[in-house]
Image (tube, rainbow, N blue to C red):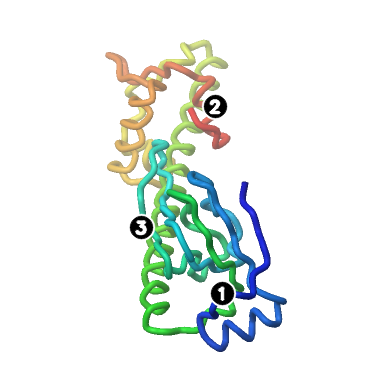
Amino acid sequence: MLTLVESRSQPPLNEATADAESAAEGRQLVMLAPGEVLFREGEPRAHVFRVESGALCLYRSSPDGSNKVVEFAFPGDLVGLGYLESQVACAQATMKTSLSRLPRAAIETTPDTSGRLSLAIEREVAFLEEKKSRETHASQIQRVAALFVTLAHQNGHEGRDPALLTDSLTCGVVASYLNMSVDELAAQLTELERRGLVAPCERGLRLKDLGALAKLCDGAPA
């Protein structure tokens, strides 16, 4: 369990830190057991931490569920730096670890902190770019799914097979409906086929799981 204890015996990072800590009635020391998480991706960023002993592994989760190591932090290193309001990585102790928890405003710019801050900002930029890419991809695949579900309902209403979309709808026409390029549409069709939701057939495209496509329209994983 994450444990906080008051400590006044640790040396300050600099005068600004010392003043801030005095105002906060002493630095808080965070104690982590091996494998314990200090903070997770997406959690509010309220403090900066300095590793006093032990080590931390900072990693990010990938869409496929795997973890990608960002860096390791050792005694003297600062973690939690950056300008976004939430963490962009998870920090987990690799061994018994102690850290000083400091207010963000208490960190004065020095050559060492400046370098680590630059790395943190680079990670934040990469995080935002990846997030935008994921959101764009999600939006596109949801639009494709929504169109297919709509066409399926229309087929059923007119007495045709709801799960069969004929080749009378060319890729160019569908792409224009969705405000996408033909290449973007092709990529989303490939992804839907990979998920087992659609399959090409002799007469056009067969919708293999209308229920899953409907859920995908609402943003639920399929």
Classify residue 183 as left or right of residue 125.
left
| One can see residue 39 in this view | no
Q: Nearer the viewer, mark 3 or mark 1?
A: 1
Label 3–label 1 contact, CB within 8 A: no
Q: Report crowding for label 3: few under 14, some 14 to 19, many 20 or more residues within 10 A (C-alpha).
A: few
Name the secondary structure under disc 3: strand
SS for callout 1: loop
Q: What amino acid type is highlighted by mark number 2? A: Ala
Answer few, some or many: residues within 10 Å of disc 1's Cα (few below 14, many 20 plus, some between 14 and 19): few
Dot in front, 1 or 2: 1
Q: Position of residue 81 (x, y in %)?
A: 48, 69
Q: Which residue is mark 1?
A: 10
Q: Quadrant for residue 102, please give it.
A: bottom right
N-terminal of the two: label 3 or label 1?
A: 1
Q: Is residue 215 above or below residue 134?
A: above
Question: Of discs 3 and 2, which sits in the foreground?
Answer: 3
Q: Could you tell me residue 159's position as x and y percent?
A: 52, 11
Relative horizontal placement of residue 183, taking residue 147 as reference (left or right): left
